[in-house]
Amino acid sequence: MGSRAVSRPFLATLAFAALAALLAACGSSPTPVSSGSASASSTNAPGSTGGTGAFACPGDAPAEDVAAAAGLIDAANLAENGTISPIQAIRFTPAGTLAACRRLSDGVGGDALWAAAWVYATGGTDPAPILPLLAYDDPTIRAIAAAGVASLGRPEGLDALTELISVDAGLRGSLPPVTVARYAAHTLSSLIDGAADSVGDVSTGTPEERSAATAAWTSWLEANRARVTFDPEAHLWQVR
């Protein structure tokens, strides 16, 4: 990638839920899009600390704007595009980021957690609110959090993304539909400058390919961990 800057994180440029209703009707989607109700995939995994309120939510925005943004997050339903499209407008806004942080602190679940994690991961500046989500049982939530954590300079995000290359589940809310494995591998390539040239082209379509891709990225990180540093201005990891 040379000196080319990338968006922080890759999920910010993914056509993420802009037309979520179409994904719900797409028979080729690896997994069904969830409804707004909480399911088994929207509960905290053992060891997760969601909802503890153990982090601060700094920021300043009019209270009415924050309340409106929180309402949009709470109303998110991945099966209804009308509830998802408005969330696009609050990403990268002070009110949206602050509302997402507060909802994460409250321990929101279901599709509202998806929305809060997405909004915060693309606009937040402190990884603390999404760090606990690296232990979440829903791989989509883990992927969103891992991309955000990695793009904010925490190596835990890189490790989490490497582990997620083995996951063949669909990335909920993505359009066009992609798997968690492909998203994780692409995000690593996007966030670590030049790493893809060393790792080489990886595919994630079969169990064997996912296993090989996971091994390739794991080996690369183990060999280069001491030389990889984060450039906060470019939002890229550099090999020194």
Image (cartoon, grey):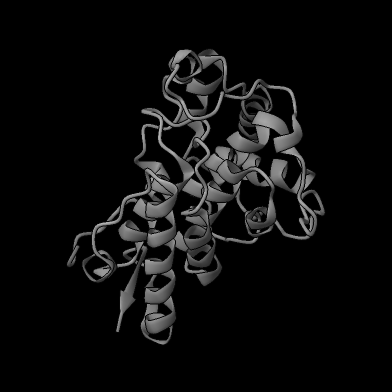
On screen, residue 57 above or below 82: below
Residue 227, x across and y down, in percent: 36, 85
Identified at 44% across, 16% down, the residue is 26
Q: Quadrant of residue 64?
A: top right
Tally of marks: 0
Is residue 97 in sight in this rendering? no
Is residue 11 in sight in this rendering? yes
Q: Quadrant of the C terminus?
A: bottom left
On screen, residue 91 above or below 24: below
Q: Quadrant of the N terminus?
A: bottom left
Relative to residue 13, is residue 68 drawn left or right? right
Q: What is the residue that sits farthest to the front in this orientation?
A: 208
Residue 220, x across and y down, in percent: 37, 75
Identified at 46% across, 20% down, the residue is 23
Identified at 38% across, 60% down, the residue is 213
Residue 66, x across and y down, in percent: 64, 35
